[in-house]
Amino acid sequence: MSADEETERSRRQHDVVAGYRIFASYGWGDDGSGHISARDPEHSESFWLLRNRVAFRDATVADLVLVGPDGSVSGHDEVAINPAAFCIHAPIHRARPDVVSIAHTHTGYGTPFAAWCRPLRATSQEACAFHDDQAVFDGEELDVVDLMVGARLAASLGPRRLLVMANHGLLTVGATVGQAVGFFVLAERAAEVEIKAGAGARVVSDDAAASVRQSVGQASSGDDSFTWLCRTRL
Ligand SMILES: [Zn+2]
């Protein structure tokens, strides 16, 4: 392994830990649901996850385990991961070599929004970050414990940034951990606007949404959001 890979691995691990702690700061995942992964820079078919039974707020780099493409786990003496974490993350990492990180959990607005089984509408600046860059998985497998379901999630996501998992919750991906986590928080806020504003909310035009996406939808916006979240939530 090169020094650059070692540095990048450490950076991704620290960002994943920060991501879990940011989720915890909102109370997300306090029942153990949800996961954030980071692809390993050396073993690119493997990814880092928080081991099972560690509270998100207590996450440390020492609690991360490396999950292989076959589900094998290394990096800790008493290892176990949430089966759903493997079945969701592994097929998406396989299908999307451009993706370094995937973030998913069940949230106060994202999950009820997902029960509508439709994409976010352009009702807020945050929603425009996903203009033309989101998909819906309408399968009824609400507990993903089968790799075949994970493969269908990956197929639904396609090349996009956000997946609305119907009756389940939101899932975001990014070329960095910061993008996956930053855009997850933006998607949750967009879902909050949809829920709170209700059916009477104005939806801006496709042209307006596309224009807003030029700024808030830049990949670097996800990293910027993550930097702010680290600054303000940790
Ligand atoms: Zn879930």
Image (cartoon, helix red, strand yellow):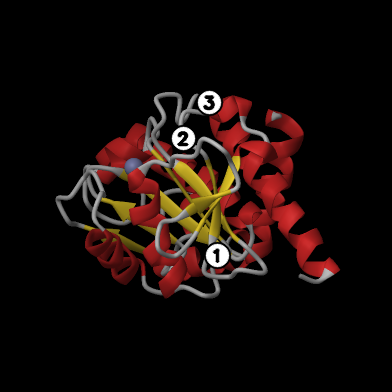
- Mark 2 Cβ and ligand 1 under 8 Å apart: no
Report how far apart the C-alphas of labels 3 and 1 lie in the structure. 35 Å
Q: Quadrant of the N terminus?
A: bottom right
Q: Please give the label number shown on residue 123.
A: none
- Residue underneath mark 1: 213
Tell me residue 22's x, y (percent): 61, 34
Badge 2 marks a residue whose secondary structure is loop
- Dot 3 or dot 1: first in sequence order is 3
Side of 126 where 11 appears, left or right: right
Q: Which residue position is annotated with label 3?
A: 55
Q: Position of residue 223 (x, y in %)?
A: 68, 55
**Residue beneath the point at 65% across and 52% down:** 178
Foreground pick, 176 / 212:
176
Image vertical order of residue 87 relative to residue 155, above or below: above
- Does residue 201 appear anywhere in the picture? no
Q: N-terminal of the two: label 1 or label 2?
A: 2
Badge 2 amino acid: Asn
Q: Is residue 111 above or below residue 171?
A: above
